[in-house]
């Protein structure tokens, strides 16, 4: 009986050691990172991304292989869609463009089309900050979200260190779709929130000098 109990105890100890060793081994093995898309795989931007000219789009109606098309958005903001012809998509979010296409395809072309619209690659969009900031320069928009006025000023190092920035008379210089120059402002930067005044491609933020 003593010998049998000893064998049982030895087996139990071995089992416990095996479990602890397995747990320690699992904890020491790093989790593999998610694979990065490669070899032509598409990493779609979020539905809130605003489409710009020269962005490359992939469009298809699921289940209708003849509708597949990949092409850049034209300089004037249009994209050629099967059966519809050119539709202006510049300035729309990806989801906004998808909803617009749903309305155009229903019901004359498809009863309930499942539209897949993806930005394959985005053009480099920029804005500039000039005047009384610490780093006057041209900056790139992030690919998948807007940039707002206060963030643009912060990107330029904030208000100039000499204290001469006129924070109550900031202007946004914008070129509209007709190529005309528009001035937005003066804007009192002390009276706006971080999500006021989203910038558009090519905007110039101008921070003037105080006169007193």
Image (cartoon, rainbow, N blue to C red):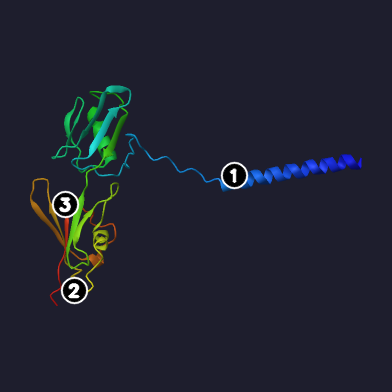
Where, by quadrant of the figure, is residue 134 drawn? bottom left
Dot 1 corresponds to which residue? Answer: 26
Residue 16 appears in the rendering: yes
Locate the N terminus and report the quarter of the image it occupies: top right
Where, by quadrant of the figure, is residue 208 drawn? bottom left
Tag 1 near tag 3, CB within 8 Å:
no
Q: CA distance from mark 2 to mark 3?
A: 26 Å
Instruction: Determine the secondary structure under disc 2.
Output: loop
Q: Residue at x 28, y 57 (%)?
A: 195
Residue 92 appears at what percent x and percent y? 23, 42
Where, by quadrant of the figure, is residue 45 drawn? top left
Dot 3 corresponds to which residue? Answer: 202
Question: In terms of depth relative to the viewer, which is nearer, 58 or 102?
Answer: 58
- Compared to 126, does 56 lie above or below? above
Residue 120 appears at what percent x and percent y? 28, 37
Tag 2 near tag 3, CB within 8 Å:
no
Q: Closer to the observer: label 2 or label 1? A: 1
Mark 1 or mark 2, which is nearer the start of the sequence? 1
Q: Is residue 49 left or right of residue 86?
A: right
Instruction: Determine the secondary structure under disc 3.
Output: loop
Dot 2 corresponds to which residue? Answer: 164
């Amino acid at each position: 009986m003593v010998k049998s109990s000893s064998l049982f105890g030895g087996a139990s100890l071995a089992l416990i050691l095996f479990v602890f060793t397995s747990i320690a081994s699992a904890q020491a093995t790093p989790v593999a990172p998610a694979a990065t898309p490669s070899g032509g795989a598409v990493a779609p931007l979020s539905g809130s991304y605003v489409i710009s000219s020269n962005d490359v789009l992939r469009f298809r109606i699921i289940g209708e292989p003849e509708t597949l098309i990949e092409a850049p958005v034209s300089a004037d903001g249009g994209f050629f869609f099967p059966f519809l012809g050119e539709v202006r998509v510049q300035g729309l979010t990806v989801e906004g463009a998808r909803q617009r296409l749903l309305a155009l395809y229903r019901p004359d072309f498809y009863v309930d089309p499942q539209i897949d619209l993806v930005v394959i690659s985005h053009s480099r969009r920029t804005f500039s900050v000039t005047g009384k900031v610490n780093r006057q320069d041209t900056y790139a928009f992030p690919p998948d979200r807007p940039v707002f006025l206060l963030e643009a000023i912060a990107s330029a190092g904030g208000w100039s260190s000499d204290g001469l920035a006129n924070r109550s008379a900031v202007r946004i210089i914008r070129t509209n779709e007709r190529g005309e120059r528009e001035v937005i402002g003066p804007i009192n930067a002390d009276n706006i929130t971080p999500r006021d005044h989203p910038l558009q491609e090519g905007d110039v933020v101008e921070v003037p000098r105080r006169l007193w």
